[in-house]
Amino acid sequence: MPRPPPRRKKKPIAGWKNWFSKTCSVRRDSARAALTDTREQLLLLQHGTREELIAQARAQLEEAKQAKIIARTRAGDLTVTATRSGRVDALPWHRGERVNAGAVVAILVPETRPFVRAYVPESALSRLQIGQQLPVRVDGVEERFSGRLTHIQQEPAFSPHYALTESQRSRLMYLVKVQLDDTATDLPGGIPAQVTLPAADTQP
């Protein structure tokens, strides 16, 4: 008769328990180490590793802020801003041309009512006062306008260098400014105009 196969020896239960316990311990220690490492990384992101590194980062932040201020200042120096709103009347320079220092780069016409600068003789000053309405005629325009006298220059525009006589005083000219009304807002700048002064027997 053939012999039966030999029976395998069963491992003791205590051995399996020891192996399972060791495996769990290894996994537990690995998980604890990973948790500790993660916590340290979180603290590093929140508080930094050392005071020296924090101080270095703050210094770099201040340098970046100063660089930002300098860049804004340079951009402001390269930006020309008009003192009042208006429309561009002329651009003397073209793209690519080198602009001289102090040169006019744009001519603006303010978005306000135009005014007239006129010269009046010394003999007519007594008939003028601030706020007075004066008729104005513009060359090439059939419409007649009305303007309000807003300024009278106290010093003459030109005068002789020697002692003034009565006849010489009549040659003195004074600059005045007449603000036109709302009907003249579309007039271009720089065109000749004529202001009609009151008659000699008219009091302001």
Image (tube, rainbow, N blue to C red):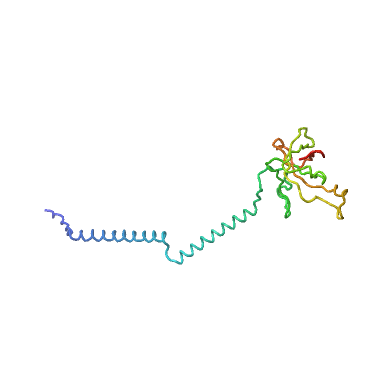
Q: Residue at x 71, y 35 (%)?
A: 183
Taking depth in this image into account, of 194 and 23 the one nearest to the observer is: 194
In x, y percent, where is residue 160? 86, 53
Asked whether, in this view, residue 85 is left or right of residue 32, the answer is right
Asked whether, in this view, residue 149 is left or right of residue 32, the answer is right
Q: Residue at x 28, y 59 (%)?
A: 28
Q: Residue at x 21, y 61 (%)?
A: 18
Looking at the image, which residue sits at the far bottom? 52
Total numbered labels:
0
In x, y percent, where is residue 112? 68, 41
Asked whether, in this view, residue 66 is left or right of residue 84, the answer is left
- Residue 148 lies in quadrant: top right
Taking depth in this image into account, of 199 and 65 the one nearest to the observer is: 199
The quadrant of the image that shows the C terminus is top right
In x, y percent, where is residue 202? 79, 38
Task: Reply above or below: 166 against 36.
Answer: above
Q: Residue at x 26, y 60 (%)?
A: 25
Taking depth in this image into account, of 99 and 113 the one nearest to the observer is: 113
Looking at the image, which residue sits at the far top? 142
Taking depth in this image into account, of 50 and 5 the one nearest to the observer is: 50
- Residue 123 lies in quadrant: top right
Task: Reply above or below: 66 against 195.
Answer: below
In x, y percent, where is residue 197? 79, 39
Asked whether, in this view, residue 91 is left or right of residue 8, the answer is right
